[in-house]
């Protein structure tokens, strides 16, 4: 999208005649030229207005151009604005070096050549425009992503709500008390909505983690009976290959959730009689690695770009939160996840850095 609104440029010089000649050279409908006759005024303006470029005279009374530039570069709001110094001392090395150290982008030596000044300003303005466009696209992407998530949650929560709402409406217009089984149904629907919200909250980047130093093999052995049951219900064999104690600081609840999500994916990707393998080991670089390997047909090619996107699923009754939650958990543990996939199956590896490297 082309940004066509005029671009603000700040011109700072204590001599009015210099400001007049700068405005005459840069006069264009594309620019909104704003003038300041001293450093203080310039600093005030940079707080109020977004500038694409500042042209700053060096020799000014009270606060000189170098001081003004230093203060502009110290402030969060203005530190990114490119500054071009306009000076009569451009040929003196000390001045040039000082200007660049402070963060000046360029120099114009008085008396300046109009063409030279115009082209320098033009190139900085075009950089500013590109940056603004990029920012705009990024915020569009963020809004679209937030929108997709909102649709996902609304869909998941509305289903149980619709059931409970319908049942309550029905009982409102009847004199009968709801039967125990109806109450049970409503409770289980509300419970379902609650579970979706709890799972969804695992995606929050700042979710609290309660780290404890734990042997991950012990954690795996502890939840292996329920994993085994889940596998058996699908006719899948669970195989554990766990070596000696592998201790690392971890939130046990989050670790279990990660293991469950990835195991469930493996189990759901396979046919009865196939095998899910959970393997842990210490890598030569000291990382603690958890691997979950299945013998399914691999992740479909068109699914790969969506891996980790909340509410993306190819399954009829699933929510599509498993991988997004797993990536979020790994991030909170400074661990990274990668996967290899093909028609022989998929292996997810989660690498936890040793505590000493965190
Ligand atoms: N091991 C795997 N083999 C093949 N495809 C997989 C595997 N793991 C994930 N996928 C694909 O990635 C998609 C997203 O996985 P994710 O775990 O995020 O959601 P889900 O399993 O569909 O739902 P949920 O985890 O919420 O029950 C799956 O629907 C599936 O298509
Ligand atoms: Mg899943």
Image (tube, rainbow, N blue to C red):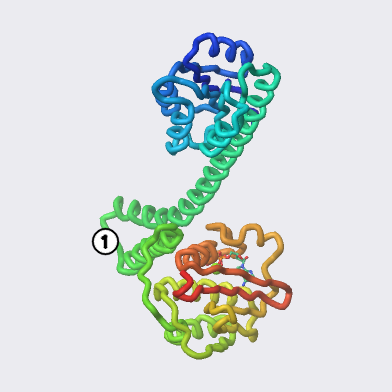
The x, y position of residue 53, in whole percent, is 56, 27
Q: Can residue 28 be seen in this snapshot?
A: no
Does residue 151 sit above or below 84 in this rendering?
Answer: below
Image check: 201 left or right of 6?
left
Instruction: Name the residue at the bottom extreme.
Output: 244
* Quarter of the view holding residue 109: top right
Q: Is mark 1 within 8 Å of ligand 1?
A: no
The x, y position of residue 64, in whole percent, is 45, 25
Q: Residue shown at 67%/16% (left/top)?
A: 114
Q: Tag 1's secondary structure?
A: loop
From the viewer's side, name the closer residue of 252 and 25.
25
Q: Quadrant of ligand 2?
A: bottom right
Total labels drawn: 1
From the viewer's side, name the closer residue of 186 and 122.
122
Q: Residue shown at 46%/51% (left/top)?
A: 154
Instruction: Name the residue at the right extreme.
Output: 343
Image check: 169 left or right of 237?
left
Quarter containing the N terminus: top right
Name the residue beneath numbered marker 1: 177
Does residue 246 sit above or below 307 in this rendering?
Answer: below
From the viewer's side, name the closer residue of 266 and 125.
125
* Quarter of the view holding residue 235: bottom right
From the viewer's side, name the closer residue of 97 and 276.
97
Crowding near the residue tagged with mark 1, few <14, some 14–19, many ≥20 C-alpha atoms within 10 Å: few
Q: Can residue 308 be seen in this snapshot?
A: yes
Image check: 214 left or right of 296?
left
The x, y position of residue 208, in whole percent, is 36, 63
The x, y position of residue 91, in whole percent, is 62, 27
């Amino acid at each position: 999208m082309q940004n066509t609104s005029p671009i603000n440029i700040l011109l700072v010089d204590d001599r009015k005649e210099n400001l007049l000649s700068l405005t005459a050279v840069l006069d264009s409908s594309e620019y909104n030229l704003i003038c300041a006759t001293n450093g203080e005024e310039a600093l005030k303006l940079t707080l109020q207005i977004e500038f694409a470029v500042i042209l700053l005279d060096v020799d000014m009374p009270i606060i000189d151009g170098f001081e003004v530039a230093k203060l502009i570069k110290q402030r969060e709001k203005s530190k990114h604005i490119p500054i071009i110094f306009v000076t009569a001392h451009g040929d003196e090395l000390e001045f040039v070096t000082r200007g660049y150290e402070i963060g000046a982008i360029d120099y114009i030596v008085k008396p300046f050549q109009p063409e030279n000044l115009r082209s320098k300003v033009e190139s900085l303005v075009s950089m500013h425009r590109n940056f603004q466009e990029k920012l705009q696209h990024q915020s569009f992407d963020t809004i679209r992503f937030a929108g997709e998530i909102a649709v996902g949650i609304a869909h998941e929560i509305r289903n149980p709500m619709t059931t409970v709402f319908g049942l309550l409406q029905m009982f409102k217009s009847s004199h009968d008390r709801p039967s125990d089984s109806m109450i049970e149904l409503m409770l289980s629907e509300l419970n379902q909505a609650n579970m979706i919200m709890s799972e969804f909250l695992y995606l929050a980047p700042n979710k609290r983690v309660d780290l404890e130093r734990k042997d991950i093999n012990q954690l795996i052995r502890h939840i292996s009976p329920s994993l085994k049951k889940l596998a058996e219900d699908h006719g899948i064999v669970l195989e554990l290959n766990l070596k000696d104690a592998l201790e690392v600081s971890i939130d046990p609840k989050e670790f279990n959730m990660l293991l469950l999500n990835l195991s469930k994916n493996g189990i759901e990707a396979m046919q009865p009689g196939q095998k899910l393998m959970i393997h842990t080991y210490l890598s030569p670089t000291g990382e603690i690695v958890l691997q979950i390997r299945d013998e399914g047909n691999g992740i479909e090619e068109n699914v790969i770009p969506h891996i980790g996107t909340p509410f993306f699923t190819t399954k009829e009754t699933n929510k599509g939160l498993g991988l997004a939650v797993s990536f979020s958990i790994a991030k909170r543990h400074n661990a990274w996840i990668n996967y290899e996939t093909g028609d022989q199956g998929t292996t997810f590896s989660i690498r936890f850095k040793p505590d000493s490297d965190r």
